[in-house]
Amino acid sequence: MSTTGEPTGATPGSTPATAVAGVPADSEEAILERVGYKPELRRSLRFFSMFAIAFSIISITTGIFLNYGFGLSYWGPASIWTWPIVGVGNLMIALVVAELGTRIPLAGYAYQWSARLVNSTYGWFVGFAGLLYMAVGGGAIMLGVAAPLLLSEFNVTSPSPHLVLTVAIILMLLPVAINIISIQVAARVNNAAVFTEIIGTVVFGVLLLVLWGVRAKPTPYGAGILGSTTSVYHNPTIYAFALAGLIGAFTLVGFELAADMSEDAVSPRRSVPRGVIWAVAGSAILGMIALIGFTVAIPNLKTVEASPLPLLTIAGYWLPSWLVKVFVAFVIFSMFAILVVGAGAQARLAYSMSRDHMLPFSGVLRKVNLRTQTPIIALLVFAVIDLGVMIYGYNQPSAFATLVGATAIIPYIIYFLITLGYAVKRRTLDSIPGVFSLGRWAWPVIGFVLVYSALIMFVLAVPAPFHAADKVVGYGFGLALLWYVAVLFWRLRRGDAGVKPIEDLVDHSPGH
């Protein structure tokens, strides 16, 4: 392990390091050596932890809780059937992530993949999009939902905006502290989140389905409500259907952050592909079960559609108040776990970019604490940035729509760009060892993902509800362009920043 805070990235133009004596040529450590990096992060995350990272960042509990009402508004109860459509589409994206993750097992996922597949300029903008994605989402969830819900658990039903902001700030800082202590503690939180996700969404959904089935309380609806397409906003059919699909598009994302933790993982070339595929498939299936349970249990459609938190309205009708509080506690913990994953992944992305001199103050941001083997400075700096973004949202007319809308579109921008890079260098990727391969299905999957992600970007950018979010993305891109033109372009031109191409990961030793 490195014992200094000196730069560890490969300087463009230098000869890639070769595998050290005693290190198998196809090991993760040899791959790091080949591209000129020193192994600095502690490899301690096994398969279940990698799966837990992907599963808890998807967070069907959080996604359904936040966006169920959005689907109801545009397509009525039948909006839940858009979920499996998005599930299949995002599973195709997960296959691309799985193949890239098994062949380029480096921290900084989107940046590393894009920079090596295309070039460092391309990687900069994709990597910046990744940092922006993690900066906007957590604050929106904490400010808009988690903080008010936590206060409601203590019977504070009408908190002042400043109290909500204060609680949200505390909730933002705790995950940073957990990650500073160690990645193992963060992993335990995420492992627990797998079970709270299942209990908080699926078990409660099934419980409501059973109570509805045995007619524990009167309800005017039968199973036919699952096909009801009543629409509150009465938009054109295609438009309404597309927006209803965002219940899944908002939720079934973020799984690629498991790949961002590759240098913290034991055998990431096995655990990343399995983790992301199982997480997306499992989330899609379990989420659908929960959606059916909550939807058939709707006691009064107009009341639920008018509620700011429809799932609480549904649960409150069927369940005693103490059990509703338990449900809310599971929801809050699931939201909190998202931030634990997000803070750790964001710091790894910043660390990965900084060791290649891509960020301002790279020399400081790439330092890893010797005891915890964690990029603590990156964690702290981006905690401050994330708080700043949340406070920006707090001062907007609609903080939740502004930040959550931006959180929704940015992943699909990243998916589109990395898949484009993947298409360019698919042949080279085939020559790099990996335990997962799409084989002859690669090109059909690539074509589908490019069209599908472009379509989702269009749906998430054009409608009026997302225009405030578009501005956040635009401001972010402007900031990335400003840094690139003012400083990074010249660093790259001098060879002081960036990475070497994907070909450097190909092992040219005898026998390979």
Image (cartoon, grey):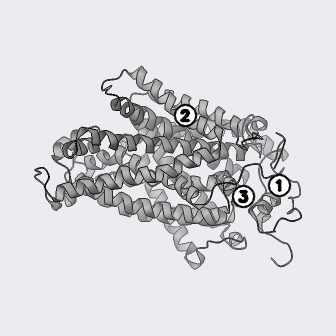
- Looking at numbered disc 2 in the image, what kind of residue is underneath it? Leu
Please report the residue visible at 15 percent of the width from the left and 46 percent of the height from the top.
300
> In the structure shown, which secondary structural element does the residue marked by tag 2 occupy?
helix
The location of residue 23, given as percent across then percent down, is: 83, 65
**Do residues under tags 3 and 2 come within 8 Å of each other at their CB atoms?**
no
Between disc 1 and disc 3, the foreground one is 1
- Left or right: 273 as drawn, with respect to 457: right
Answer whether residue 234 is visible to the viewer in this image: yes
Q: Is residue 397 above or below residue 429?
A: above
- For label 1, the residue is 36
**Do residues under tags 1 and 3 come within 8 Å of each other at their CB atoms?**
no
Q: Is residue 267 above or below residue 174?
A: below
Disc 1 to disc 3, C-alpha distance: 13 Å
349 or 156, which is in the foreground?
156
Label 1 vs 2, first from the N-terminus: 1
Q: Which mark is residue 174?
A: 2
Q: Which mark is residue 116?
A: 3
The location of residue 92, given as percent across then percent down, is: 49, 66
Please report the residue visible at 66 percent of the width from the left and 36 percent of the height from the top.
482
